[in-house]
Image (spheres, rainbow, N blue to C red):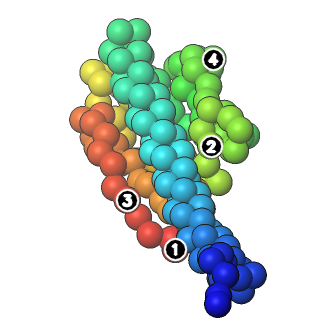
Amino acid sequence: MRSAGTTLVELLIALAVILTLSALGWSGVQRYRAGAALQGAARAVSRQLALGRTLAVSRRETIRFREGTAEVLLLAADGTALSRLGVGRGTDLPVDSLRIRPGTIRFNARGHAGAGSVYLWRDGRGVRLVCNFLGRVRQEFISAP
């Protein structure tokens, strides 16, 4: 007569299946978190661009948006910093890299901008924020170079 219960082999197989499924789930969670962090950074940069446009109109002067050392800056016409965002993991913008092309996006007193793009990268994913000459921003997802 056979006893009712499970063998060690059955328990090890069940444990292996559970561990495999949890490992697959964890990689999905990590990808989701990286994507969410990139989206949050893109929203923060979009808000900074909108702030730069608003400040340019309200102050009736040229406002520049450019990258500094580990930060993104909004600069007044005289060069004083109006706003800063940190760039890097554990900062305001948790991204691996951020590039502005051309090096500076300028907003004039009418809210119009010199066309430019902001590139954000995190864990092989990218977002391009395109600022057109009217100062409006649109978001595009891009693949790794």
Let me know if residue 16 appears in the view. no
Q: Is residue 102 above or below residue 52?
A: below
Q: Label 1, on which residue? A: 145
**Of marks 4 and 2, the one in the foreground:** 2
Percent position (x, y) of residue 37? 54, 45
Q: Label 4, on which residue? A: 80
Which residue is outermost to the bottom? Answer: 1
- Type of the residue with mark 3: Phe
- Type of the residue with mark 2: Pro
- Type of the residue with mark 1: Pro
Instruction: Measure the alpha-carbon separation of dots 4 and 2.
Output: 25 Å
Dot 3: within a 10 Å radius of its alpha carbon, few (fewer than 14), some, or many (20 or more) residues?
Answer: few
Instruction: Measure the alpha-carbon separation of dots 3 and 4.
Output: 32 Å
Percent position (x, y) of residue 13? 65, 82
Q: Which of the pair 2/13 is nearer the observer?
A: 2
**Of marks 3 and 1, the one in the foreground:** 3
Residue 94's disc number: 2
**Residue under the point 37% across and 59% down:** 141
Classify the position of the N terminus by image quarter. bottom right
Which residue is outermost to the left? Answer: 134
User: Residue 82 sits in which quadrant?
Assistant: top right
Which residue is outermost to the top? Answer: 59
- Type of the residue with mark 4: Thr
**Residue under the point 43% across and 36% down:** 43
